[in-house]
Image (cartoon, rainbow, N blue to C red):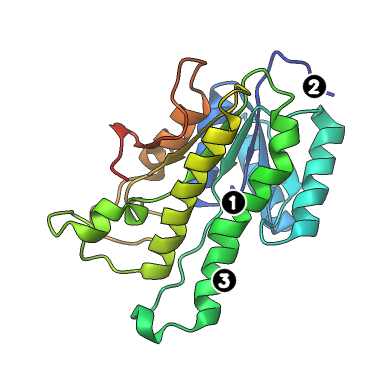
Amino acid sequence: MSDNSTQIALITGATDGIGKETARQLAEKGVRVIIGARNLEKGATVIEEFKTSGLEMELVALDVTSNASVTAAAQELEARHGRIDILINNAGIALDRGPLADMPVEEFELTFQTNVFGTFRATRAFLPLLRKSAHGRIVNVSSSLGSLWTMTDEKSPWYQVVIPAYAASKAAINAMTVHFARELKDTGIKINAVEPGLTATRAVKLPGAQPVSVGAEASVHYALIDDNGPTGGFFDRNGPYAW
């Protein structure tokens, strides 16, 4: 079991991109970081990489699309630490390859299975451990593409970006965030959705994309808000973001 002097954070999908950088930044701030990984071999490589730079982290097998995997991870972390203080639902996919009218139902379902049901599955499973924290925090990694404003305002910088399954999944995450915040408002647990911004990752190779060090800032900030911080909001690194 861990003492209460060090915050413990679990990050889903943390072996690459924004999730991996979020792990780095939190560890550098003294947080005990647990990397959730579907592929334990890849996760172990990431742990070793961080270790060579002086950052000690933990690893747990975690596939957010699997009830059995998420349940086993929750049981494992309860045995290790008895609680977690921070849950960052970072795992997500984007599969859109064409117009919505031509999209296979299976592709839409798979997007929701990871992005929406995975986020719900992890939040629900780890809530008992967060309830044991004095300052529980949940961060749901959303997207500007999940904003109804960006989808409907032709002046929005993202209006022309049409990946509807992904956008719908992130809008669903935003709605889920609001409802969890309402349910948890008297518990001290704060939950917010964040928009990382267009970030250069293995899957994103677009002009103007910011480095992952910037893309992780919102996740890190809202994971570490104090008891006067917001809950049930949608934010980017600069503050509130339009729903």
Compute the Cα span from label 1 to label 3.
13 Å
The quadrant of the rendering that contains the N terminus is top right
Q: Which residue is mark 2?
A: 2
- Say the numbered circle drawn on residue 239: none
The image quarter containing residue 86 is: top right
Compute the Cα span from label 1 to label 2.
25 Å
| SS at mark 1 in the image | helix
Q: Nearer the viewer, residue 164 or 60?
A: 164
Percent x, y of residue 58: 72, 37
- The answer to the question of whether label 1 and label 2 lie on touching residues, with beta carbons closer than 8 A, is no
Q: Nearer the viewer, residue 77 or 203?
A: 77
Relative height, residue 135 to residue 34 (above, below)? above
Is 211 on the left-hand or right-hand side of 50?
A: left
Three-letter code for the amino acid on which mark 1 is drawn: Thr
Is 124 on the left-hand or right-hand side of 231?
A: right
Q: Earlier in the sequence, mark 2 or mark 3?
A: 2
- Say the numbered circle drawn on residue 110: 3
| SS at mark 3 in the image | helix
Compute the Cα span from label 2 to label 3.
36 Å
Packing grade of label 1 (10 A; few <14, some 14-19, many >=20) is many
The quadrant of the rendering that contains the C terminus is top left
Three-letter code for the amino acid on which mark 2 is drawn: Ser
Q: Which residue is mark 1?
A: 119
Q: Earlier in the sequence, mark 1 or mark 3?
A: 3
Percent x, y of residue 4: 73, 15
Three-letter code for the amino acid on which mark 3 is drawn: Leu
Packing grade of label 3 (10 A; few <14, some 14-19, many >=20) is some
The image quarter containing residue 146 is: bottom left
| SS at mark 2 in the image | loop
Relative height, residue 10 to residue 13 (above, below)? above
Residue 95 visible in the snapshot: yes
